[in-house]
Image (cartoon, rainbow, N blue to C red):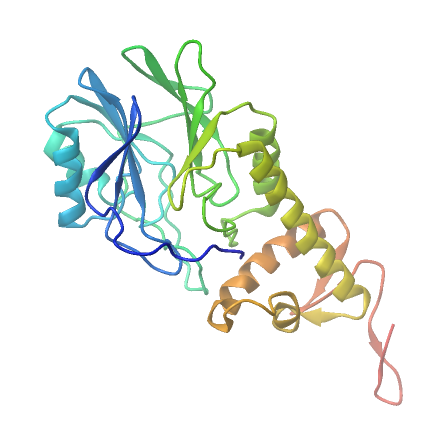
Amino acid sequence: MRAMEFPPQPWPVGSAERLEPLVARVLATNPSPFTFTGTQTYLVGGAGGMVVIDPGPDEAGHLEALVAAIGGAPVMAIACTHTHRDHSPAAAPLAARTGAPIIGCAPLALVDHGARADAAFDPDYAPDAVLADGEAIAGPGWALRAVATPGHTSNHLCLALEVAGEKPALFTGDHVMGWSTTVVAPPDGDMANYMASLALLHARDDRVYYPAHGPQVDKPRQLVRGMIGHRRQRERQILKLLSEGARPIADMVPRMYKGVDQRLWPAAGRSVLAHLIDLAARGEVVCDGEVWRIAGLRIFVDVSGRDAD
């Protein structure tokens, strides 16, 4: 859960920032310790047609800012990378205002009362069509192609802007963020899928990432390589702790996240659980109730009442 410091205010809330000829960005009014300065909605295309990516929360001010940024251009589609409530709720009201179809990730809404470091799911998301991996929305001289990246959520998509003669720009949603490492929270978050999706992105040759939170990423492969290394380091921490003795997650988190605000420790425990589930599937650890241990080591209590391996 590494994160950068918040930039000084004022932030460009509600105004359209032109990032490149085919890409503009509008910052929503939902800053928090979990969304950084807020959700960044992207408008891809121009006067001949555009796609709105991650319309964000259903807030009147943000919706009006998007309508103003669209400026009467035809909206070909509203595309959501996943269905957390800071990404997809504005899709329906924006569709009603523009007449555009909602085309993007599959619907997914889970009831999850556990500690989170991200938003809960949007139960009202109802796409007109779902983009499968490799399918594209074609615009005048460009295309947005779906790149399935499960892990943060099982329905997460990245979207690659393809223009002839250029390397793609990738809209990464929450899979890769510009300000913090990504939350992988079971039961839907899956560490094995997340790592596989990172490997998939590392093998690509994108020129820039536009995440839903935080600044753009100008050295994508370098960042992804660091993210993979960070997760492997967490995995090694877990295995080292368990090699010293069986323990519950609640005992691991304070040792692993010493420099992190303690209010975030319950959410950090979800990430540790995701690692443990992955390690268990690979046969490296097992769980006895709430206590985790290295596979192959049996814990018993001897006649003196002391734990022994």
Residue displayed at 60% across by 59% down: 273
For residue 227, which quarter of the picture? top right
- Where's residue 157, x and y in %? 43, 33
Residue displayed at 77% across by 53% down: 284
In the displayed structure, 21 sits above or below 15; it is above
- Where's residue 119, x and y in %? 37, 55
Residue displayed at 54% across by 60% down: 270
Q: Would you say 293 lies left or right of 275 here?
A: right
In the displayed structure, 50 sits above or below 279; it is above
Residue displayed at 64% across by 53% down: 275
Between 49 and 193, the residue placed more toward the observer is 49
Q: Would you say 112 lies left or right of 85 here?
A: right
Between 263 and 90, the residue placed more toward the observer is 263
Q: Quadrant of the C terminus?
A: bottom right
- Where's residue 281, x and y in %? 70, 48
In the displayed structure, 39 sits above or below 253; it is above
- Where's residue 79, x and y in %? 31, 31
Q: Would you say 221 lies left or right of 73 here?
A: right
Between 106 and 35, the residue placed more toward the observer is 35
